Amino acid sequence: MKKLFLVAAILGFVMLGLNTNLSAQAPDKTKDTVKAVTDTTKTEVTETTDDAVTPEAEEKGIHEVLKVKFIEGGAFFMSFILIAFILGLALAIERIIYLNLATTNTEKLLAKVEEALKTGGPEAAKEVCRNTRGPVASIFYQGLDRTEHGIDVVEKTVISYGSVQMGLLERGLTWISLFIAIAPMLGFLGTVIGMIDAFDKIQAAGDVNAGLVAGGIKIALITTVFGLIVAMILQIFFNYLTSKVDAIVNDMEDSSISLIDILVKHEQSKGGTFKK
């Protein structure tokens, strides 16, 4: 943009210099030439200025429109919708980070546990689980810690601790679903109150003014629009989190069954059996 202004300025000075020389040779045409050059220079500068300002105006326009619409919708109800969006989004981001950290390569973990059982027994296998992050490794550790009590105790421990881990995975999802439900409700409430206010103004005026009615209805509907937008955004995050939790839970169940099979096979390879 600076280059365009510089080029326009240089062109302007060059044209003005030419006009000065021409005015010495042809005094009668000076006014017309200067006027034409000035108009041309103004046109170039105006076009350059418009090209420079347009992108910034468009960028500012989005923020300005959102700010204006937020104010028009009413600070009271719009603030509650904004709070619901911020809290719901914060919880969704926290859950995404937690679930991604909880994801484990169970095939690799099972291979390490099986190898550790062959070389060092249950204690070596527990050490592998201690050094692995995620709910699957925690379930494996609890099961391996009770191998001496028999296979039945191991199965019950795995099932019970699996339920505990599933509860930790689902923590916070109920709050996100609450914000999904409450955001459009707040929007509808603001719309209803705005409509009531519009009709109160009509009653006070004693006449149906189309501008008054249209303005009141427009302002009233803004809260509903923002509430629905917030609900849709949070619903996308909620569905992603739910699918992520289901995938981890299924992985936990499959790997727990594989762990029991590995323990039974390991005990049989030593020539013994688990207590029943």
Image: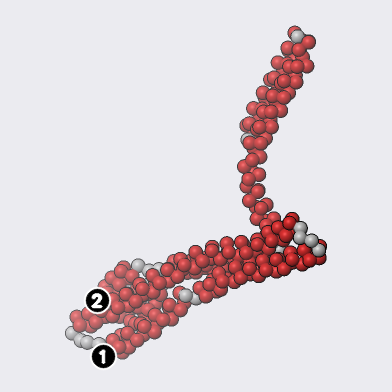
Q: Which SS class for mark 2?
A: helix
Up-down relation of residue 214 to residue 153 (above or below): above
Q: Quadrant of the N terminus?
A: top right
Residue 185 position, x and y percent, is 61, 70
Q: Residues within 10 Å of mark 1 (few under 14, many from 20)?
A: few
Q: Is residue 227 visible?
A: yes
Between residue 198 and residue 71, name the one nearer to us: 198
Residue at x 56% of width, y 73% of height? 178
Residue 17 position, x and y percent, is 72, 17
Q: Quick one: label 2 or label 1, which is nearer the N terminus? A: 2
Between residue 177 and residue 113, name the one nearer to us: 177
Up-down relation of residue 14 to residue 171 (above or below): above
Q: How is the image coloured?
A: secondary structure
Up-down relation of residue 101 to residue 35 (above or below): below
- Residue extending farthest to the front is 207
On screen, residue 111 versus residue 85, left or right, reads left
Residue 274 position, x and y percent, is 25, 87
Between residue 6 and residue 241, name the one nearer to us: 241
Residue at x 26% of width, y 90% of height? 275
Residue at x 65% of width, y 48% of height? 60
- Amino acid found under the numbered disc labelled 2: Lys
Check disc 2 and report the residue beneath it: 118
Residue at x 39% of width, y 74% of height? 249
Q: Quadrant of the C terminus?
A: bottom left
Check disc 1 and report the residue beneath it: 275
- Amino acid found under the numbered disc labelled 1: Lys
Disc tally is: 2
Quarter of the view holding residue 180? bottom right
Q: Residues within 10 Å of mark 2 (few under 14, many from 20)?
A: some
